[in-house]
Amino acid sequence: MLRWPLMVILLASSFSRVCLAQTAPPATPPEQQQASSATSTATAAKSPSANKVWTNDNISQVSGSISVVGDKRNQKTDITAAKSADPGTVSRIRQDLQKLQLQLDDLNRKLISFKDFQQGETVAGGDDENSKGYTRTPVNQQISALEQKKKKLEAQIDALVDEARKKGILPGQLR
């Protein structure tokens, strides 16, 4: 019974010491206090000469020119017309994109067919795979292989579109 009140008293005294240590101002010599007050007045003197933000109320006090966003008189750069792309390059990229898109469409059709088969539905499509014979590869492995091919084809399509964009070909020219 005697331990409990003693522990409370010790805890309260240590807590009050910590609180007093945190709230007590650091002891600084008077010379440092005078130096710090001198530097604070120097910075206060510099702050009015800093950039001023003008509002509608005091815009009449501004001297000099005012920059207005969208004002055509203050433009420093000329906007040049985009160069037209080489027609041969446009047709080559368009043909490559069409070929890759056909491959991607065929791959998507096969993926749908395999997923339907995996879910137990009947597959009523005549694929070219029938003439090649049977395969012992499980359906889920075939699906994952087709999905990897799909990712590669999509990456190739993205690379062609990026190439066209870098050469200045508009997206409408590739359709």
Image: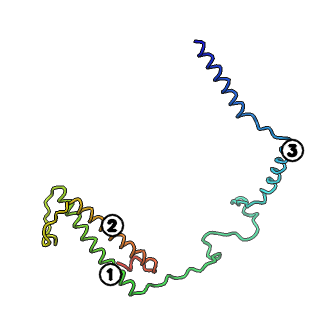
The amino acid on which the numbered mark 3 sits, given as a three-letter code, is Glu
Residue type at numbered disc 1: Gln
Q: Secondary structure at mark 3?
A: helix
Residue at x 30%, y 65% (from the top left corner)? 148
Q: Image quarter for residue 51?
A: bottom right
- Residue carrying label 2: 151
Residue 155, numbered label? none
Q: Secondary structure at mark 2?
A: helix
Q: Residue at x 60, y 71 (%)?
A: 70
Between 75 and 113, the one nearer to me in the picture? 113
Tell me if residue 139 comes above or below residue 5 in the rendering: below
Residue wearing tag 3: 31
> How busy is the neighbourhood of tag 2: few (under 14 within 10 Å), some, or many (20 plus)?
few
Q: Is residue 50 left or right of residue 144?
A: right
Q: Is residue 133 above or below residue 166?
A: above
Residue 128 image position (x, y, % from top left): 16, 72
From mark 3 to mark 1, how far is it between C-alphas? 82 Å
Which label's residue is closer to the chain start, 2 or 1?
1
- What whole-number distance in Å separates the C-alpha atoms at marks 2 and 1? 20 Å
Give the mark nearer the N terminus: 3 vs 1.
Answer: 3
Foreground residue among 167 and 63:
167
**Which residue appears at 13% of the width and 66% of the height?**
134
Q: Earlier in the sequence, mark 3 or mark 2?
A: 3
Picture residue at 50% right of the left edge, 82% below the top: 82
Percent coordinates x, y for residue 165 in the rendering: 44, 76
User: Badge 1, how many Cα within 10 Å: few under 14, some, many 20+?
Assistant: some
Give the residue pinned by disc 1: 95
If the image is split into quadrants, where does the N terminus sit?
Answer: top right
